[in-house]
Image (cartoon, rainbow, N blue to C red):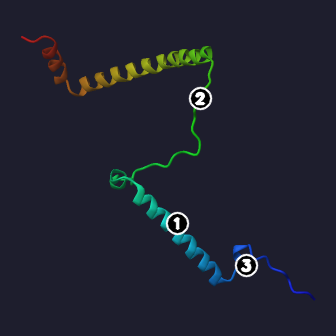
Amino acid sequence: MSEPSFSMTADDDLPRTIRREREAREREAREARERAVVASSTPLERDRDDSFAVQAPAATVTDFDVPFLKLMMFFIRAVFAAVPALLLLTVLLWLFGLGLQTFFPQLLKMKILIYMPQ
């Protein structure tokens, strides 16, 4: 029976010492590149706090093509949809005010004093 042939290009097939040596070289190269970038940057760039920096998204929207009439109709429908919500909000606030006046009648006297100062 013949010996099985193993590919030396796969990472799992490499001996542990060779794999560690290659990782060490890659790490040294990466650290050297990072040091070169830091050394070439201006002092203002080095002192900047990047702890809250956000990575750039994978894609950027450059154009949003919507026909004007469709966009106009969308916003007109949105305005008509907002009318019942505003009416409901008005009724709820009015009922809330009535409830406050029921439990705190002195508010009515304050309201009169504010509207009709003497």
Q: Quadrant of the N terminus?
A: bottom right
First of labels 3, 1 by sequence position: 3
Question: Is disc 3 placed on a helix, strand or loop?
Answer: helix
Residue at the disc numbered 3: 13
Q: CA distance from mark 3 to mark 1?
A: 24 Å
Q: Count residues near mark 1 (Cα–Cα under 10 Å), then give few for <14, some for 14-19, many for 20+.
A: few
Q: CA distance from mark 2 to mark 3?
A: 48 Å
Question: Is disc 1 placed on a helix, strand or loop?
Answer: helix
Residue 36 pos. (x, y %)? 45, 62
Residue 17 pos. (x, y %)? 62, 84
Tell me the kind of residue under disc 1: Arg
Which is more toward the observer, 66 or 90? 66
Q: Quadrant of the C terminus?
A: top left
Would you say 17 lies left or right of 117 here?
Answer: right
- Please determine whether, in this image, residue 96 is positioned above or below residue 50: above
Q: Count residues near mark 2 (Cα–Cα under 10 Å), then give few for <14, some for 14-19, many for 20+.
A: few
Residue at the right extreme? 1
Would you say 95 lies left or right of 64 here?
Answer: left
Residue at the disc numbered 1: 30
Question: Is disc 2 placed on a helix, strand or loop?
Answer: loop
- Please determine whether, in this image, residue 91 is positioned above or below residue 42: above
In the image, what residue occupies the spot 43% across and 17% down? 87
Which is more toward the observer, 26 or 5? 26
Residue at the front extreme? 40
Which is more toward the observer, 66 or 42? 42
Residue at the disc numbered 2: 63
